[in-house]
Amino acid sequence: MSPAKKGLALQEIVFTLQKYWADRGCLIHQPWDAEVGAGTMHPETFLRVLGPDPWRVAYVQPSRRPADGRYGENPNRVYKHQQLQVILKPPPADIQDVYLGSLVALGVDPAAHDVRFEEDNWESPTLGAWGIGWQVLLDGQEITQFTYFQQAGGIDLAPISGEITYGLERIGMYLQDVDDMFALEWAPGVTYGRVRKEEEYQLSRYSFELADVDLHRRLFEDALKEGWRLLDTKDAKGAKDARVTLPAYDWTLKASHAFNVLDARGAISVSQRAGMILGIRKLACAIAQRYVGVDTETEPRTAKGDAPAAVKRA
Amino acid sequence: MPEFLLEIGVEEMPASWLPGLTEQMRQRFTELAQASLLVPEPVQSFSTPRRLVVTGQVAARQADCEEKVWGPAAKLAKDAAGNWSKAAEGFAKKSGVPVDQLQQAAKDAAAPNDPYLFFIRKTTGREAREVLSSTVIPPLLRALTFPKRMNWDAMLIDERRGDLPFGRPIRWIVALLDGEVVLVTIHDKQAGARKPIVTSGAETRGHRFLPRGRSSEKVKVTSWSDYRARLQERCVTVDPGERERAIRDQLAKGGATNVQDFGLLEEWKHLVEWPTVVFGRIPDEFRKLPTEVLQTVLVHHQRYIPLGEGEHVTRFAALTNADRAAEAEIVRGMERVVTARLRDGAFFFAEDMKRPLSDRVRDLSGVTLHQGLGTYAEKAERMAGLVDTMGEGLGILTKGERETAREAARLAKADLTTLMVREFPELQGVMGGIYLRAQGHPQANVAEAVRWHYHPVSIEEGSAPARVFSGGDATVFGAVSLADKLDTLAGYFGLGLVPTGSSDPYGLRRAAQGAVRVLLDFWQTDETERRPSLRKLVVATVAGYGGKLKRPEADVVRDLETFLLERLRYVFTARGFAGDEVEAVLGAREPDALDDPRETWKRLQALHRVRLEATEDFEALAVAFKRAKNIIGDRPPAEVDTGLLQEGAERDLHDAVSELQPPPPGSGRQGGGVDGGYESRLRSLSSLRGPVDRFFDDVLVMAEDPRLRANRLSLLSQALSLFYRIADISKLGG
């Protein structure tokens, strides 16, 4: 590897993409402060895509997938990776070109590579969400998931949202021309391994060997219970309370993470799996319904034009 | 005639949809243009992932036409005083013609003296451009169907005014008639007429990135040939056939001719607009990896074609949408992806090989099959037990076959605990076979039976693993494959987890089809007593659960029989046999379809052929036997008292039936073990047509004398039962 070839450091990739999308009207949000498996689970995606209000947002989301943990020994697979997620609601007609512009900003000249949009639809059974789209391949390497959301929480979306999810480590490895994720340069002179390898080891060990199965079963059940309890609360007028969706959604995320830990621990059988996923989905769908006002006696949400200044400028 | 060109510019459509969509564009356009009186000349359609194209010649305008519009009868047109009646005036008003300009003529040639009022409506044909933009293109956009449609917030303000879901978003439309734009507009669903999102024009777009620096320019086109040529300059080959030739040429140039392409060549031509084939190398360190692992990584994960010398995969060919100048850089990236994946594979292989596969059988007790069905260790035991029953209880395996099949059944699932299968689940079974072979399992055929036991998965007669096995090997494979599938079916049915509608989460339909196929296409024996009965196998499988199933065994057996019969019907129909022929052989008895699926399959083929030769005879027999069945009901055949046969036709039928009675069991001729047996028997049975027809013409079956009636019913019943061994002829003809 020649030093001249070396691309942006991981944190520079983040800066570049955040600047790129901020310049295109996106609000730059922060990672959600709970364990999630993907950027889609951040309420800035799951809830904001519901209802009619326009929205544009981008954020980095560390994503935990306990079953993918490899004790820091696999150069390509990790317990926790980082996604940079962009939501464009509604998607502009030139969304693909705008996305390709972000690759140019990262130093990729598409005319000198093979960049392709290959069919890859996305579905999250736990969130009752699905979309149509592609994986974006750069010389055979998947670097982005590109999805037109069609449904979230079981609700048909109007308008739809465009979701762009960059796999930051993958892009970094490509740009820096390294074969081992842990050899990535996070900041100049500091490797990804130095920042994260020990974390990978400990979290993998925890999910595969140490996690208390009974505790996580209880956490799973309790989290769902708490979510439903919140949805059952009534407001001052005795109607179903519309202002409990955010904490209820947090509990949905906790249930989902407990499920993932149990799964990594090998404690879930095929039939249990389907039932547990259904349990999470039901809660997520009920929250989505409450969020858009379908199951309350209050007026449904309508476009209020309350998009942030950044969004309005777009 | 003016030339028409339509290009629907889209975001990348899935490659697998394009062949169907291209054909739909041609057909739907032709139909709609015809219905709109534009007489389209041979229409051609083309596609790339980013465009659906149709072109042809159409009439410049619709022909003018005249049409007689009939009104009330002339006798009702005037009242007694000779004034125009209300009916006549109303008709004139509706027609927009002064009432005294209405004409009269006879409406019906058979009633020349009964004239009616009429007028001639003249329709002036509209210009093609107007017709295309109103009654051809908008309906065409709506008529295209996709395996999966998406909402992209678009609507068409046409007659049907409403949402326009599509396969992927439409981003531009070129619609030209002799170079003039045909107007079509798509609007935003929320904003409606206020916000057009796509308006047709004369400008297309070239390749996304090529030629460098010019890719964002819009490209004005005037005609089909101009369009095609301009696009070629912009690195887009619009004809999939031309792209395929380019791909083959480039493969040949790279020394890859007659390659095993795993179906990729068909897909490749629809993946890109500008096919550039590149070649990468597989590093030597992966030489020792099993070919199947290399193929899985290359074919299934990357869509690359493996190339090699002899058995070794040493290179791969990959398709790109790129400029040849970028080849070196692209190949470097691809090789890196492949290497990363193969390095995983090599690590898994080395780790897995450290333990003999048979050691892993006990690890299966930690792998849950299903909460209610225990672990894979229990499944392996049940499978081995079922194989034992096949050998000892049912007597359909020889001792040698049983021992081999038993060992294979015991080992079949062990590879589920290997790292390789956990990473590449599509290699289940395959890896088990590979590890057994590499580790030198002492019993021949065990590795092969394990490798293939998830098959057959598709329903075509010649599909895998046809041609891999023959004779006793096929029986061993069949026993293991059946044991696996039947065990799965019995287990899930035993829990009440039965497929409903389109929901079949455990793949039980496929499992049942696989089981049926083993018996139809693989497990072949000429010895009647060693022929497997699906009915007995089901009972044995359910019993193998030793009372652990939630539902009563008898219920599970009954439901499974119904399910398997349904899948058998499905396989037969899918193989192209007419529904009534399938019903006829499934209606046969002794043995019935579940007792002997393979014989049923032979009978079906025989019936199909003989019916083709003697279509009329079979139609007539079907009618007669339907009638007979209605009369007889389910009465079993009784002896016929020849003394009571009175009419000639009655005696003739009795003679014909006696002549055709099969020889008693054990005389060697029965059973149709040879494929031709059924055919010749059906041919002779078709000779019953004459006697049966005469019988119904001349003889009163429901005679007043109860003894005569009973005797005639018995005679009919015997005639029917002659066929029952092959097919229930009364089911023919729907």
Image (spheres, coloured by chain):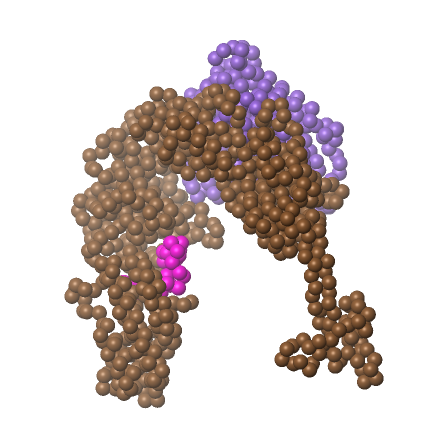
Chain colours: A purple, B brown
State whether residue A43 appears in this view.
no
Q: Is residue B395 left or right of residue B152?
A: left
- Residue A121 lies in what quarter of the image? top right
Considering depth in this image, is A210 or B281 the residue closer to the camera?
B281
- Residue displayed at 80% across by 68% down: B97
Q: Taking A108 as reference, is B265 above or below it?
A: below
Q: Is residue B569 magenta?
A: yes
- Residue B104 lies in what quarter of the image? bottom right
Q: Taking A30 as reference, is A281 above or below it?
A: below
Considering depth in this image, is B95 or A281 the residue closer to the camera?
B95
Quadrant holding the C terminus of chain A: top right
Q: Is residue A30 left or right of residue A224?
A: right
State whether residue B15 appears in this view.
yes
Q: Principal SS element in the magenta part?
A: helix
Q: Is residue B55 left or right of residue B536?
A: right
Q: Provide residue B53's location: percent of width, then percent of height.
A: 58, 42
How many marks are shown on the rendered structure?
A: 0
- Residue displayed at 25% across by 66% down: B681
Q: Residue furthest front?
A: B1
Q: Is residue B397 magenta?
A: no
Q: Provide residue A71's location: percent of width, then percent of height.
A: 43, 22
- Residue displayed at 29% across by 65% down: B726
From which residue to which does the magenta span run?
B565-592
Q: Provide residue B37's location: percent of width, then percent of height.
A: 64, 56
